[in-house]
Image (tube, coloured by chain):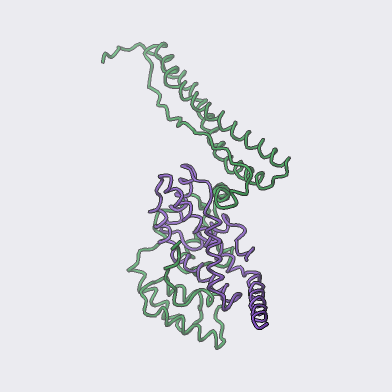
Amino acid sequence: MTSRVIGLGVALTLSLAAAAVAQTPSSEARDASRVYELAVMLESVTLRCKLIGIDRQPKFQTFTARQKRGLTGAKEALMRHFEAVAKADMNREIDRFYIRTYNFYGTGRTDQESCNSFAELMDILAEPDADAALLTRVAEIMVPDPMLDAYP
Amino acid sequence: MALLAGAAVLALPAPSLAQPAGSATEAGGQADLIFWQSVSDSNDRAQYEAYLAAFPQGLFARLAQAKINATASSQSPAASVPTPPQAIAKAEQPRKQVASRSSVSPALPRSASALPLLDQPFVEHLRAIAMTQGKRYQNTSVILPPRPMITLVGSLELPPQFCSALERNAFYENRFRPLIDRASENNAQAIAHMERLNSMVKEAENRGDSNASGALAQESRSYQPVAMAIYNDRVALEPIFTRIMAVPVVACKKVTP
C-alpha cells in the first residue's frame, strides 16, 4: 500500500513538472533556442561532411570562437528558461532538450554542395564584424520554429 | 556534443539590460553596482559600452565613458575591418546600425528591429539550406533536384584588326562561338532546372504535400537570382558579334612563329 502511495506521488510530481515545462517560452528563450539549434545544425553538418571526406572542422571552430559570446548567451538564456519552468528538474530537462536537439539535427543532406554552403555560412559568421546580432538574425531565418515551442 | 558546454559564463548576463534605462529603483541601483563591479577591472572596451547601454544614467556612467575614451586609442576599431559579409544589405543605415551595435550588444540582442538587414537572395538561400538539415529534411517527401553544373563562360578580348576576312571568320568560330555555346548551354540548363522545380511544386501541391511544395518553392525562389545571372551572361555576349564585325580587316604581314 505504501509503495502505491509513493508511486502515485512520483507520478503526480512528474506530471506537474511536465505541465510546468509546457509553459510558453519567452522571446528571449525562443531566440536562444534558435541560436543553439543553429550551432547544433552547423556542428552536425560539419561532422557529417567530415565523414564523407570534406573537412570543414577548422571553419566550425573559428565560427564558435568568433561567436562565443552569442553562443554562451544562448546557453545561459536556455538555462534561465529551464530554471524558471522546471525548477528542481532543470538539469534533467535541459539535458533532454540538448539530446533532442542533437537527435533532430543528426540527419540531413550531406554532399559537396551542401558542405560548401554551410562552410560559406560559417565563414560569414566568423567575420571580424559578425556579431551576436547577425548570429541571432541568421538563426531567426534558418530556425523559424524553435524546438522549444514544441517542448517537451 | 561538447558544443557550448565549456563556454565561459559572463559575470552578469543580459537580463539587466532589459530593464528600463536609468531606472532609479533600489534593485536597479544594485544591478548597476553589481554590473559595474563585474566590469571595472576589465580592459575590454566592449564591457564598458555594454554597461553604458544598460545604465546610460548609471552611477558609473562617466567613469565608463572615461574608460572607453582611454581604450579608444589602444584598440583597433572594428568598423575599419573591410570584411562585410557579401550578403549583408549594402544600405548605409542598416550597416551603421550593425556596426554601432556590435560593440554594445548584449549576448543575445532582443529587439528584432536591432538585427541586421540581410539581402533577400541571401535570406532565401539560408532558408533553403536550412530545409536540407535535420528531420525537416527527412519529413520532406521529396529530394530537391541538384542544381545544374554551370560552365564558366570566360571573357573575350577582341584584336585591334584582322588580317583577312578568313581570320575574322576563324576568330568567330574558334573564340566567340564556344563562348556563345557555353552561355547558351548554361542558360538552357538553368531554364530546365527552373521548369523542373516549378513542375515538382505543382505535383507536390496536387498531392497535398505542403512540406515538399514549400521546400521546392523555396529552392525555386533561391535559384531565381542564379538563373537571372546566367541569362544576363548570355545576353551580354550578343553585342560582341557586332563588335567582331566592326573590327577592321586590313592587309598585314603574316607573322611566322
* Residue closer to the observer: B25 or B134: B134
Q: Position of residue A38 (x, y in %)?
A: 52, 58
* Residue closer to the observer: B44 or B126: B126
Instruction: Tell me the quarter of the picture where residue A128 sits.
Output: bottom left
Q: Is residue A81 above or below residue A6?
A: above
Q: Residue at x 37, y 69 (%)?
A: B72
Q: Residue at x 58, y 78 (%)?
A: A87
* Residue closer to the observer: B70 or A134: A134
In the figure, what tint was chain A given? purple
Horizontal side of B208 relative to B132 (left or right) equals right
Q: Is residue B179 above or below residue B207?
A: above
Q: Position of residue B2 (x, y in %)?
A: 43, 63
Q: Position of residue B243 (x, y in %)?
A: 47, 22
Q: Residue at x 37, y 22 (%)?
A: B160
Instruction: Tell me the quarter of the picture where residue A140 sits.
Output: bottom right
Horizontal side of B199 relative to A120 (left or right) equals right
In the figure, what tint was chain B given? green
Q: Please tell me how many numbered marks the rendered image carries.
A: 0
